[in-house]
Image (tube, rainbow, N blue to C red):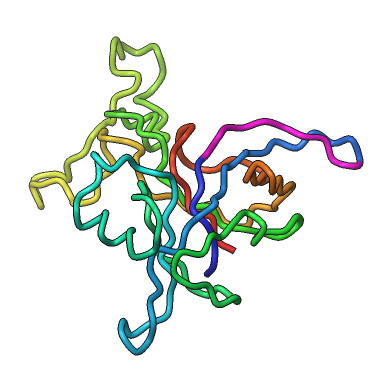
Amino acid sequence: MSGLIGKKIGMTSIFDENGKNIPCTVIEAGPCVVTQVRTKEVDGYEALQLGFDDKSEKHATKADLGHFKKAGTSAKKKVVEFQGFEENYKLGDNITVEVFSEGEFVDVQGVSKGKGFQGVVKRHGFGGVGQSTHGQHNRLRAPGSVGASSYPSRVFKGMRMAGRMGGDNVKVQNLRVLKVVAEKNLLVVKGAIPGHKNSYVIIQK
């Protein structure tokens, strides 16, 4: 699937032609540089490696600097491979947000917000133990029983418990492109996407 690397700017809302208020997310999509061209003869598959967001030389390894020098560009913070581009791009070419058009649908992938160590009510939607009466005291949000009698005398794997929540790879599919602002490299999609502000996202057609 062809696409671009972007950065989540934040959420807003716009009005459509019928006056309906639509929640949407603004993404800074590209421009991305082609940093490597994968071919069937050499790599066994066809793909384009794209780089996004400049990195200062002092934070790049010599291997990185040599790799990006072949493409005639500066070191990049984020590098992702994409397949299925219709046009034949060459090493060092720039791909802009204009590969997307208004009205089409895209998939957006990113790392969800990390929420730290959370209990079972927030993490799994448990209802808590009983009501606030009947001597519950401070057990309203407790997980309840986790064992399984004297046999098998252990807790089954996969039991839903408290633990670290968020920070997962999440893909939201079929988001409609509401607006493409080419001069500012902005893409406006309907709805919410994973990640915090200024986090990197992968937009696929």
Up-down relation of residue 129 to residue 3 (above or below): above
**141 horizontally vs 7: left or right:** left
**155 horizontally vs 105: left or right:** left
Up-down relation of residue 33 to residue 122 (above or below): below
| Quadrant that contains the C terminus | bottom right
Q: Is residue 184 magenta?
A: no
Question: Which one is nearer the viewer's eye here, 170 or 83?
Answer: 83
Up-down relation of residue 173 to residue 162 (above or below): below
Hey, which quadrant is residue 99 in on the image?
bottom right
Question: Which one is nearer the viewer's eye here, 165 or 43?
Answer: 43
What is the x, y in percent for residue 187? 65, 46
Give the residue at x 41% y 35%: 113
Give the residue at x 10% y 47%: 154
Give the residue at x 24% y 39%: 58
Q: Residue furthest right?
A: 18
Give the residue at x 90% y 42%: 17
What is the x, y in percent for residue 188? 67, 44
What is the x, y in percent for residue 115? 35, 30
Up-down relation of residue 136 to residue 50 (above or below): above
Q: Specify start and end residues of the magenta stretch as a single range.
A: 8-17
**102 horizontally vs 42: left or right:** right
- Magenta stretch secondary structure, dominant: strand
Q: Residue furthest bottom?
A: 41
Hey, which quadrant is residue 65 in on the image?
bottom left
**134 horizontally vs 18: left or right:** left
Q: How many marks can you see?
A: 0
Question: Which one is nearer the viewer's eye here, 159 or 10?
Answer: 10
